[in-house]
Image (cartoon, rainbow, N blue to C red):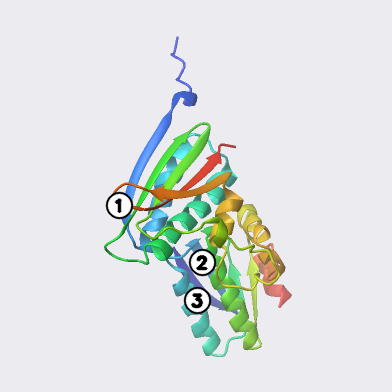
Amino acid sequence: MSFTIKKEGEIVVVDVEGQLIVGNRQELKQKVLDELERGEKKFLIDFAQTGYIDSSGLGVLVSLSKKIREQGGELRLANLNDDLKTLFELTKLDTLFQISDTRDRALASF
Amino acid sequence: MAATPPSDAGLRVSLEVEIPSDVSYIERVVDLIRHPCAELAYNAHQLALNVPVALSEAISNAILRANNEDPDKRVFVRAEVDTRQLVVDVQDEGEPFDLDGNIRDATNPDNIEREDGRGLFLMRALMDRVERFDANGIPSGNIVRLILSRA
């Protein structure tokens, strides 16, 4: 499992490879907060290569969303497979996040 | 004439795994239990969502909440898988807790923006049954039993 961060124009894109779970959530949180501290405002997390997400992973996404909004920024999500969509629907987190089917659509939506 | 392979219906896989109270072991245990479920043709959604997420929640609850990440305490996971159902017992060495009393409705508007409190809710949502009972042997603690019928 790993997190890759790159810039697409003025958007910070994070790829989550493998699981987003209690054992690695702090690493994702810290990487995004470091970018926020550098002044970045627009964030996209891409789950195209993600396996499963547990409640701690969901919690980190909620926490990051709040912190980014507090700084006047925005966090959007892309490429949730059917199972990840089910997870977001079960927890109603699909109502909290703007979620795009593809990375390109998400990038164009900012 | 080639012999007909035996049906999976007669198979039962039993696993016992013991880990320290360290969350870095969770993914490995999930993989160990998911593998026989895949062999016995549990469906793709169960393999990608129900089994790994509910198991992760039960094990992380045992490590973080019940055992408080105490390096002297262990987590014991026992799984039985057949073509009918998966039954997993996750045993900790912590104080008894009220499983039902601690489940918070994660979909309540007041809870949506909370960082925590989705673990037990997800276990209940993703398994057919979730039970807690006292482990009366040595060590004592809680056993959380997850049951999922094969789909």
Q: Amino acid at mark 1?
A: Pro
Marked residue chain, label 2: A
**Gap in Å between the C-alphas at discs 1 and 2?**
28 Å
Q: Nearer the viewer, residue B35 or B141?
A: B141
Do marks 1 and 3 share a subunit? no
Q: Which residue is rendered at x = 43% and y = 27% of the image?
A: B11
Q: Which mark is residue A80?
A: none
Disc 2 element: helix
Q: Is residue A14 visible?
A: no
The residue drawn where x is 41% and y is 65% is: B64
Which corner quadrant holds the N terminus of chain A? bottom left
A5 vs B142, left or right, is: right
From the top left corner, tell me how far across and down residue A4 is, in percent. 49, 71
Residue B75 falls left or right of residue B114: left
The quarter of the displayed image where residue B74 is located: bottom left
Q: Earlier in the sequence, mark 3 or mark 2?
A: 3
Checking the image for residue B139, the label placed there is 1
In this rendered view, identify the residue nearer to me: B9 or A1: B9
Residue at 35% x, 66% y: name it: B69
Q: Which residue is denoted by mark 2 in the rendering?
A: A56
* Residue to which mark 3 is pinned: A29
Q: Nearer the viewer, mark 3 or mark 2?
A: 2
Mark 3 → mark 2, Cα distance in angstroms: 11 Å
Say which chain tag 1 marks. Answer: B
